[in-house]
Image (cartoon, rainbow, N blue to C red):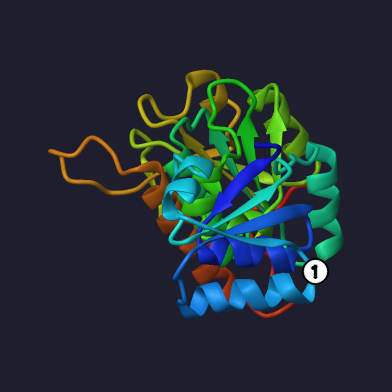
Amino acid sequence: MDGEPIAGPRPVYEALVSGDRVIERIHVARGSLSEGLRRVLDEARTREIPVRRDTRAVLDRLSPSAAHQGVVAITGSRGYVSLESLVARAERSGPPALFVVLDEVQDPRNLGAVIRTAETAGASGVIVAARRSAPLSATVAKTSAGAIEHVPVARVGNVVNALKTLKKRGLWVVGLDPTAPEAWTGFDYTVPVALVLGGEHRGIRPVVGSECDVRVHLPVRVRVASLNVSVAAGVALYEVVRQRREAPAPGESSAFRRD
């Protein structure tokens, strides 16, 4: 196989319409006629991308790690963007920047789910650690339901240095930490924000937590140690959405500002 697979009607369709990837060909299971698949075939025909009809066994081999639902696209690997380009793009876009920083999230399904929620919440991008982090794989693309085609992802060698850079560019760094005294609703997210979430097993590393301006927690029952990272990201991101929709009129200043 000469490229990375994207599996499922919606992820394949989003890859087609985004135009960010070169799609070499599309494999479709014989007898598949779903509405989502028809949209894929129509778009592929418009873009003159070859379509092959194959058995489901062939599609299973092309995409062994993700449920394909009758369609697999063969494409080049999804590339990362640089941290500088990610920040510069957010600064040009107008609304206050909103980044999700993931400190060693290793499960590709969690990464895909976070990217999907980040896209729906209007986040400027996702930042991941280069080490001990899930790569942008077919499983991530599938779990993100196509959102990976619209959310830029930067991979950084040192999360602490990345947070320092974000703070120099005017962002407030807010870490989600179950031991923090402050509730997640107690911060003013109408300012440019980077939300930091830790990995599946140990949360935010202490060295990363020390670089956060503020640490907040989500309430959990005592019998449950913590929320899944993708669930926590969704709760926090939609608090940002809520606050920004209810933001004060222009001219009223926030208590949280960086000079």
Residue 253 horizontal/vertical position (percent) = 69, 66
Residue 194 horizontal/vertical position (percent) = 62, 46
**For residue 101, which quarter of the picture?**
top right
**Disc 1 residue type (three-letter):** Glu
**Residue at 67%, 80% in the rendered image:** 249
Front one among 121 and 171: 121
Residue 37 horizontal/vertical position (percent) = 53, 72
Front one among 184 and 74: 74
**Residue at 64%, 37% in the rendered image:** 1
**For residue 83, which quarter of the picture?**
top right
- In the picture of the structure, the residue carrying the numbered disc 1 is 48
Residue reaching furthest to the left: 223
* Left or right: 251 in relation to 137: right
Residue 214 horizontal/vertical position (percent) = 53, 40
Neighbor class of circle 1 (other Cα within 10 Å; few <14, some 14-19, many 20+) is few
The answer to whether any part of residue 108 appears in the image is yes
Q: SS of the residue at dot 1?
A: loop
- Tell me if residue 37 comes above or below residue 7 in the rendering: below
* Left or right: 226 in relation to 200: left
The answer to whether any part of residue 246 appears in the image is no
- Tell me if residue 221 comes above or below residue 151 in the rendering: above
**For residue 250, which quarter of the picture?**
bottom right
**Residue at 44%, 30% in the rendered image:** 199
